[in-house]
Image: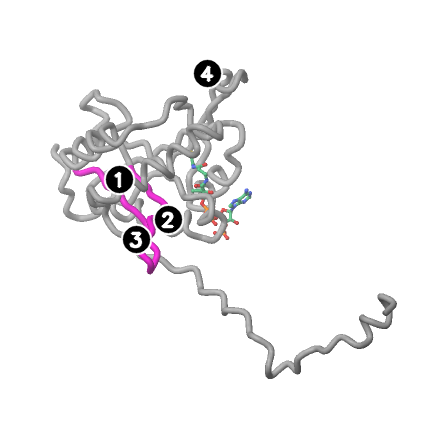
């Protein structure tokens, strides 16, 4: 049989008998404070960007022990550290703040850090996580939040911060070197709302 004749004869099932594709589930998540059991997922998310991008200036993967130590340290300082979890229990991303400096007069000011698993990016989760982080920081009496963003490959981060009211306050050129390239940093700052009862030590 010729190919054209074969095509004409091919049977096609009527629509009502064809198998329907599974409906796409809506992208949903819960944002909550981190627990220790989330740290392996956080490590995996962060290490992807350490190895494959210049959005972080870290060049060596972080170990679980380093993440445990960081969590303890941030808890002692009452610094928010949040994760987003899917209905099936997968950690989709995280956001945290850490002191801007170890010098005590900086105690109302923090630097933030936000990373999503690749599959979770570009769907509004970054905005939701950063909004939740800002809220938690305001509850905790923190007054200034700064984002230090790489000047290459971090367009989504700059866009996200600017959408949430962060303002660019400066840049530094050629302060980092990764994958054989010089990299600069963009500084974005946001003043946070003062809530009535600050829990932060004077
Ligand atoms: C940066 C990151 C957290 C942003 O989260 P996201 O979920 O991808 O961003 P969202 O979908 O919430 O987008 C937030 C806003 O920024 C805009 N935006 C996102 N990516 C953009 C891009 N590449 N260019 C322009 N605008 C962009 C969106 O349109 C959205 O605006 P809207 O809320 O008014 O609609 C996420 O992409 C990520 O984890 N990237 C890799 C790690 C990283 O760079 N971390 C930051 C290190 S400083």
Quarter of the image that includes the N terminus? bottom right
First reached walking from the N terminus: tag 2 or tag 4:
2
Q: In the rendered image of this protein, does residue 132 appear above or below residue 102? A: below
* Residue denoted by label 4: 175
Is residue 45 highlighted in magenta? Answer: no
Among the 4 quarters of the image, the one containing residue 137: top left
* Residue denoted by label 1: 39
The 10 Å Cα crowd at callout 1, few under 14, some 14 to 19, many 20 or more, is many
Q: Secondary structure at mark 1?
A: helix
Q: Secondary structure at mark 3?
A: strand
Distance CA(mark 3)–CA(mark 1) = 15 Å
Q: Is residue 44 left or right of residue 108?
A: right
Name the outermost residue toward the front: 1
> Percent x, y for residue 153?
53, 32
Display coloring: one colour
- Residue appearing at x 48%, y 27% in the figure: 54
First reached walking from the N terminus: tag 2 or tag 3:
3
Q: Secondary structure at mark 4?
A: strand
- Residue appearing at x 42%, y 44% in the figure: 117
Q: Nearer the viewer, mark 2 or mark 3?
A: 2
What number is the disc on residue 92?
2
What number is the disc on residue 31?
3
Distance CA(mark 2)–CA(mark 4) = 30 Å
First reached walking from the N terminus: tag 4 or tag 3:
3
């Amino acid at each position: 049989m010729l190919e054209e004749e074969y095509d004409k004869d091919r049977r096609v099932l009527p629509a009502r008998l064809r198998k329907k594709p599974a409906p796409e589930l809506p992208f949903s998540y819960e944002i909550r404070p981190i627990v220790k059991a989330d740290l392996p997922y956080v490590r995996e998310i962060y290490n992807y960007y350490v190895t494959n991008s210049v959005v972080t200036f870290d060049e060596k993967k972080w170990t679980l022990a380093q993440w445990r130590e960081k969590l303890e340290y941030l808890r002692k300082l009452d610094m928010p550290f949040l994760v987003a979890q899917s209905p099936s229990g997968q950690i989709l991303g995280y956001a945290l703040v850490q002191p801007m400096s170890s010098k005590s007069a900086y105690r109302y000011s923090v630097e933030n850090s936000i990373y999503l698993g690749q599959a979770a990016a570009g769907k509004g989760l970054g905005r939701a996580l950063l909004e939740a982080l800002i809220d938690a920081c305001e509850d905790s009496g923190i007054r200034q939040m700064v984002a230090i963003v790489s000047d290459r490959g971090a367009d989504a981060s700059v866009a996200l911060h600017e959408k949430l009211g962060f303002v660019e306050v400066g840049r530094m050129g050629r302060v980092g070197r990764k994958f054989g390239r010089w990299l600069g940093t963009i500084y974005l700052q946001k003043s946070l709302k003062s809530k009535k009862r600050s829990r932060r030590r004077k």
